Image: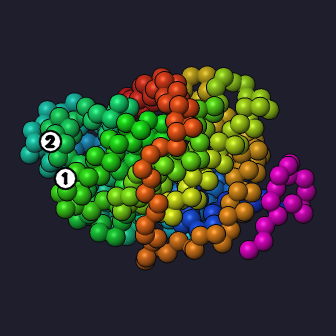
Amino acid sequence: MKFAILTGIVAGPLVVLAQLNALAKDAGLLYFGTAVSPSDSSDSAYYKYENDVKNFGQYTPDNAQKWDATEPSKGRFSYGQADSIVSRALSNKMLMRCHTLVWYSQLPSWVSSGSWTKDSMTSVMESHISNVMGHFKGKCYAWDVVNEALEDNGSYRQNPFLKALGDSYFAVAFKFAAAADPAAKLYYNDYNLEYFPVKADGAVRIVKLVQAAGVPIHGVGLQAHMTVGRTPSRENLTWTLNKYTALGLDVAYTELDIRIKPLPSNASSIEAQAKEYVAMVGSCLDVPRCVGITVWGFSDAHSWIPQTFSGAGDSCLFDKSTKPKPAFSSVSSLLASASGKRPPWNTASPPTGAPVPTTMITATTSAAVTSTAAATSTVAATSAAATKSTA
Ligand code: XIL
């Protein structure tokens, strides 16, 4: 497939903008995707770009499938906004990553403030998972079954599920999910796995708990909410991804963005951002079982970052006017240069085996570790904002 890769400004009708999903597929990924929101249609340029399968082969609803949206009161299920996103994806011939079932945030108060026993919480989880997954059965390529169950130090986050069931809630959730839609790929999904080895190992522990219970788990999603100047090297990112492929799982970057702080951004922070996007995408290309990459919105006008992380922003591939940034050109060029280097992703028989790393690449370890303090300070902001948005 031939593409003219745009490296500068969109100058005229002869310039063809590189098409991320088409390039990603040529490079052996299953998709290049984006988060979508029902309000995207209010920006016609953005919406037009979003609806072209050559640009995006996969959607994740940003909020429409969360517990507060799908089961706002006990036993009353509502799917309006999620249905319209799912049907748009399917009519565009795109895949759905469905998001998310068991998460401490954006929980309706009847769950977060309820008083639960092991049995009553198990039955609430079963009802939620079987109804929501049952409603979308056959339409979701993957589901984020459990989201953000770890603190940055690798311990389990206190949430109503852990309080009622202890660490058995992981296997319980995946068991109900496997029963509700046996064809869906079932993921554990979290942030800062890229930054904190101790947190990445926490996710390994969760995977092993589920596997030991004899319950299916197919992948780990690394959210990849990164910060310019703190993104680990491509080699260290690959090392982290391989922790999960070594357990027989797929991996994916599920919510990629790379925020800039302080604002305003300038030529040097925008250039650094382009390099860090290349490290992220490159690490996925380096791991045969890295399925694909989803960006959490693709223009600076439609990003969750400014509302969530005070003083940070400009985290996307396109600027506020939906014009491509250097990160877009760099990612496009990287994907184009990887064309044909991996076989096309075959959903029926995905690649098996991957290099199993034994030690982290030492030259860059300290960079990864020093990045942790800064990353931690933003985590509280994530949770606070997410919680606020629930209220
Ligand atoms: C974010 C949404 O984008 C925001 O609109 C909402 O206010 C808060 O949640 N991790 C996740 C996503 O798993 O669901 C979050 O999405 C971002 C962090």
Q: Quadrant of residue 216?
A: bottom left
Residue drawn at point x = 39 percent, y = 54 percent: 244
Residue 381: horizontal and vertical position, in percent?
46, 25
Left or right, 229 with respect to 365, comes to right
Could you tell me if residue 98 is visible in this image?
no
Residue type, mark 2 in image = Leu
Instruction: Please give left or right for residue 96 compared with residue 137 in the image.
Output: right
Quarter of the rendering containing residue 267: top right
**Dividing the image into 4 quarters, which one contains the C terminus?**
top left
Report the residue marked by disc 1. Answer: 172
Viewer-side residue, 360 vs 86 = 360
Q: Assess whether residue 2 is covered by the magenta stretch.
A: yes
Q: Which residue is mark 2?
A: 165
Q: Main secondary structure of the magenta part?
A: loop
> What residue appears at the point 46 percent right and 26 percent down from the top-left corner?
376
> Does dot 2 land on a helix, a strand or a loop?
helix
Question: Can residue 90 be seen?
Answer: yes
Mark 2 and mark 1 in contact? Answer it, CB < 8 Å: yes
Give coordinates of residue 219: x percent, y percent: 38, 57
Classify mark 1: residues with Cα within 10 Å, few (<14), some (14-19) or many (20+). Answer: some
Disc 1 residue type?
Val
In depth, the one of 43 and 7 nearer the eye is: 7
Q: Secondary structure at mark 1?
A: helix
Q: Position of residue 210 (x, y in %)?
A: 24, 54
Magenta stretch holds residue 116: no
